[in-house]
Image: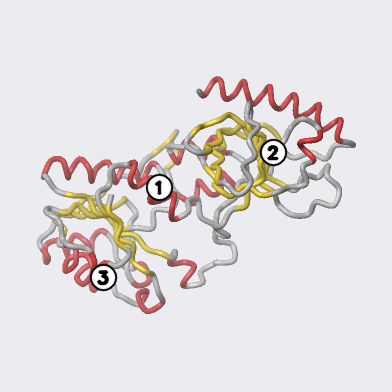
Amino acid sequence: MKVYYNINDFKPVKRAIVTIGTFDGVHLGHQAIFRKMTADARETGGETVVVTFFPHPRLVLNIDSSNLRFITTQEKKLEIFEKTGIDNVIIIEFTREFSRTSSEIFIKNYIVDKIKPARLVIGYDHHFGKNRMGDFKLLYDLSLKYNFKVERVAAQDVENIAVSSTKIRKALETGDVRKANRLLGYDYTICGTVVHGNEIGRTIGFPTANIATSDAFKVIAVGGVYACHVLHNGISYQGMGNIGYRPTVAGNTSLTIEVNIFDFDAMIYGEEICISFVDKIRDEVKFANLDELKHQLLRDREKVLDLLSQKD
């Protein structure tokens, strides 16, 4: 997959199959668009092109930016694009000046002139351009004017729920990770660098890897204990994760993301791991002492192992 951080560096490809969007989460709805694109490319001998934006438009335009959180980092988004078989990605820098570009000018100057699409594939509710005024009708009219085809992919439903990034964020915020994962089509994941903690877990037989994430806008699932998979150096391990404030530990006031990796004892401070959350098994609870916490963690571990054995 080729990634272009300046659209002027992109050289038009033969029979380009194009889509446009921010694609937060790269969920099942987005994946349906990509499957359609790759099928079209195979049929026509063309190449797929994803046009996306960075930073996120709502951050630049300061639309509820204090509460704005994203399901996927830019790095993770590109990784999923590549797994779905996309050939080319163009990342357009989103600025306030760019935000004033009208829908028609955007299609003419950026898509038609720079990419020369044979087909444009979009989601059922796609809007674009200044104030998101562009819609399917406008695209259809422009397709006749500029000689390309436009195709719309229907809404993807999971258990009669239309998939959307907003619904996935809400599921994570309420702790329904299983629902979020069904809508995503993969397990919700947090990656970060392993940092030093207070090592309380080690004293009770449950050493944890604490991680620091570099993305301040990453959506973090609600606090609790989770069944997890942990990826380190390309190897996947089972684990038991915790998100929260560790109320049993006196004086702890900052949110922590940590995981007890099963059958693993290497020192990995400063290294990156990715924690994929499979299911939430309970809320955080304040115990009277560390001995009570240890006994609960032993029960939690058995439940996690049972859940993961069913999934694996």
Amino acid at pointer 1: Val
**Number of the front mark, 1 or 2:** 2
Mark 3 Cα shell of 10 Å, populated few (<14), some (14-19), many (≥20): some
Taking the image as shown, residue 15 lies to the left or right of residue 93, namely left
Residue 118, percent from left and from top: 13, 55
- x, y percentage for residue 61? 47, 72
Relative to 219, is 131 above or below? below
Find disc 3 in the rendering and name its residue: 106
> For mark 2, what is the residue?
208
Q: In the image, is 213 to the left or to the right of 149?
A: right
What residue lies at 71% left-to-right and 27% top-to-bottom?
Answer: 300
Q: Measure how far apart labels 3 and 1 are at the Cα level.
A: 23 Å
- Report the amino acid beneath label 3: Phe
Q: Which residue is mark 1?
A: 26
The circle on residue 70 is none
Residue type indicated by callout 2? Thr
Q: Position of residue 17 (x, y in %)?
A: 19, 52
Disc 1/disc 2 C-alpha distance (Å): 30 Å
